[in-house]
Image: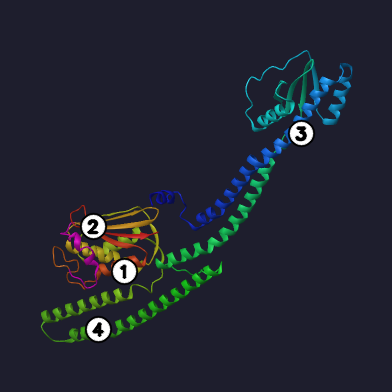
Amino acid sequence: MKVGRFIKQFLPRGLFGRSFIIIVAPVALVLGVFTYYFFEHDLDTTTRLLARDVAADVALLASLEDSTPALERDGLRALTARRLNYALTFHDGAHVAPPSKPPTSTIDKALDEIIETRIGAGRHFVTGRIGEDFDIKVDVKDGVLEIVVPRDRVTVSQPDIFILWMVGSALILLGIAILFLKNQVRPIERLARAADAFGKGRPVADFKPYGASEVRRAAQAFLTMRERIERHVGQRTEMLAGVSHDLKTPLTRMKLALAMMDANPADIAAFQADISEMEHMLDDYLAFARGEGGEEAETIDLVELVRDTTAAAAKARQAGDFPVTAPEVMPFNGKRAALRRVLANLADNALKHGRHVAVTLSRDERAVAIMVEDDGPGIPENRYEEAFRPFTRLDEGRNLQTGGSGLGLAIARDIARAHGGDIVLSRSAMGGLKATIRLPV
């Protein structure tokens, strides 16, 4: 298990990278096996066969030098050089010096072994190189016969050409495979981007199924799912709009009747406050059920939106403006009215229970963060998630929905998650509660 996890750290995570390895690994393995087999088996066998012929020629020339009269040797050497394409030189009275170091290459070792077998252990010889050619010196009757043998007579000429052709053809095939592989992966990447954008509440207008049949089926299933969700949200929004109209109509009549009643002003004011609270609660219920589904996403400046919303919340609570720490501009693609409602709910909760409130905006490569902090009593850490439950009113320490419907945080989290983000609660450095909105960019 540990070895598998260690290997996974170095493997690519994307489909293209993994598919590329699936293609490259077998090709590299086959190339390695063929290269090893060529150099260690075929090349060595071919070299020994060629060296055996050269060794036979050397043994024959040495025998002819020993058995031919001195006056006839020059003519014999010239004839032999023309027939065998060797360069022959006779060193009169010389002797073969022992080699300074043993041969290192496979070709030189094979040539030494075969020549020694052919000419016998009693005759001294030494092999060397003159450029690319092989230089063989062998003792004869009254001197040393030097034989310069062309390279192509001893070994395969330019074996690197084989590797070049093999690697070149493999690279061409890999290039073609990569081209086709990208075309197969591209539809999957587009499907992933479309699903991600739809999950964040952003429009996906130009997406069409294409690619392999399996990818087309997955894309068509995504489009069908999107249509069903949008139809469901649209029907629910239309229904709730009608419910809102039907419920607000009697409330409006009641407000009009109270305005025309000749009664105690204190009683009328109390009734009007109750009706206003009912309207506010009704708006909260409908907003939570609707989920801001009918609004289209657009590019907005979060800094401007936060400053405007917090200033309006402070004015409504008759509190002074609280500081907002943010860059000059922070563009974001989202639903303006929905995000304004999130910020208004969090700012109103903070102002309701704290004397000092601060808002901070930050951004990294993956998400934007909006932190709303206060110096109120806060809530216990084990009740953070409970605060997000619909219609929940906290009784201990801090009632985040005092005088409300118990839906403020539930609506805020629902909207944040509709944008692909979330809201989390934590302890503030100011002593109260800190609500952090994280939205993916």
Question: Which segment did they paint magenta?
Answer: 375-393
Q: Is residue 47 visible?
A: yes
Q: Nearer the viewer, mark 3 or mark 1?
A: 3
At label 4, counting other C-alpha atoms closer than 10 Å, the crowd grade (few under 14, some 14-19, many 20 or more) is few
Q: Amino acid at mark 2?
A: Ser
Residue 414: assigned label:
1
- SS at badge 1: helix
Quick check: is 387 in the magenta stretch?
A: yes
Q: Position of residue 295 (x, y in %)?
A: 38, 72
Instruction: Please tell me in which quadrant of the rendered image residue 363 appears.
Output: bottom left
Measure the C-alpha gap from mark 2 to mark 4.
41 Å
CB within 8 Å, label 3 to label 1: no
Mark 3 and mark 4: span between their CA atoms? 115 Å
Q: Which residue is mark 3?
A: 53
Instruction: Give the answer, above or below, for where 115 lies relative to 430.
Output: above
Taking the spot 53% from the left edge, 61% from the top edge, the residue there is 185
Q: Amino acid at mark 1?
A: Asp
Q: Quadrant of the C terminus?
A: bottom left
> Which secondary structure, mark 3?
helix
Residue placed under numbered mark 4 in the picture: 252
Q: Which residue matches tag 2?
A: 426
Q: Position of residue 269 (x, y in %)?
A: 14, 79
In the image shown, does 353 or 183 lie closer to the viewer?
183
Q: Earlier in the sequence, mark 3 or mark 4?
A: 3
* Total tally of numbered discs in the picture: 4
Q: Nearer the viewer, residue 265 or 381?
A: 381
Q: Where is residue 419, by image quadrant?
A: bottom left
Disc number lying in front (1 or 4):
1
Question: Is there a contact, CB below 8 Å, between mark 2 and mark 3?
Answer: no
Dot 1 or dot 4, earlier in sequence: 4
